[in-house]
Amino acid sequence: MALNATKKAVVVGPYRVHNFGDDLVGAIIAKRLQQGGYEVSVPRLGQGNADWLGTKYSESYDGLLQSADTIVVGGGGIMSDTSGSKPGASYLNIVARAAIAGQLRGKRILVTSVGAGPWILERSKMLAFGVSLLADKIGVRDQESFDHLASIGVSGSKVVLGADCALLSADYLDFKAKPSGKIGIQFDTAQFSDVGENPNLKAIAGAVKAYAGAHASDIVLISNGKHKSSLAADAPSCENLQYERLQDFLPRLAGLKSIFTSHLHLAITSYSQRIPTFSLYVREKTKRFYDQIGHPERAIDLSVATLEDFERLIAAAEVATWTDEDEATLQTLQGRARSLLAFVK
């Protein structure tokens, strides 16, 4: 934190669950604001993360919106109502309240590195439109989000199309990779009820467990939250990596050889560290990312996936290497991600 900071900023986002991806983007936004001379608070990001980042720790928004000069909404599919484990669940209520409170007090309001739409509920669509009207600028991480906002009447002149700011973890956060040379596996999909109808899901889950158990010395089981991987009981000899603090989690994640995951920001962050990534995905936003990086063949919709799909992806993960084409694409996407932070100042 800048010692002579006179400006104050609060980052509003989906941080109460302590999900790795959301916390990571919130941290990157916070560091960008610090570079601009702001004293920053990211409510509910956690004491450990706040200590590492040098931000003001808070578990509530009490008084922060009133005292802030700038309010930044950022991280995750926060401008959607389909991003959580239960479709229809949304952080839009929190975002809308913060935007209205800021507008009433003449605060500057920015939205960045978000997914916008689609919306299940008409009320959610109205809230997203209202927040967009109040914001000075909106940065979205993919073309689909840009198009969703345009479809509800948000002016394209207000919206910046870029790429997810998680691609910039090494730009803003101070950590060094701890190489393990292992394959990371994250396959905690039980909370996603809408993929349970796939008749192949039980066989796929069994194959993932069997693979982890058979290759335990070469596998790290990953959880993007404090809970242990659901695979741990069936593969007790595997190394485990659970997310509690960014400071501890990022170096180990960055040391992997490749990663197989259903979680978007584990894939994005690994890719930003030049780690080949593969997914049986649950949310369409994950497919969008693999399209962006030029590897649509590495992502299969879990609701229709087969056992053969898993076997193909994990075999590819064993031998995948980072290529010159991957590097060129990464550099392009990182440039686009920087455009979503350029107006956060």
Image (spheres, grey):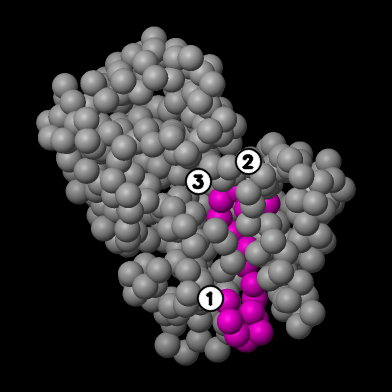
Q: Name the residue type under label 2.
A: Pro
Identify the mark nearer the N-term, 1 or 3. 1
**What residue appears at the point 60 percent right and 70 percent down from the top-left corner?**
345
Question: What's the residue at 30%, 40% (across, down)?
Answer: 229
Which mark, residue 311? Answer: none
What residue would you read off at disc 3?
A: 334
Q: For numbered disc 1, what is the local secondary structure? A: loop
What residue is rendered at 50% in x and 86% in y? 5
- Say if the magenta span includes residue 73: yes
Q: Give whichever of 117, 140 is nearer the camera.
A: 117
Quarter of the image containing the N terminus? bottom left
261 or 40, which lies in front? 261
Q: CA distance from mark 2 to mark 3?
A: 30 Å
Badge 3 amino acid: Gln
Which residue is most to the right? 153
The residue that disc 1 covers is 60
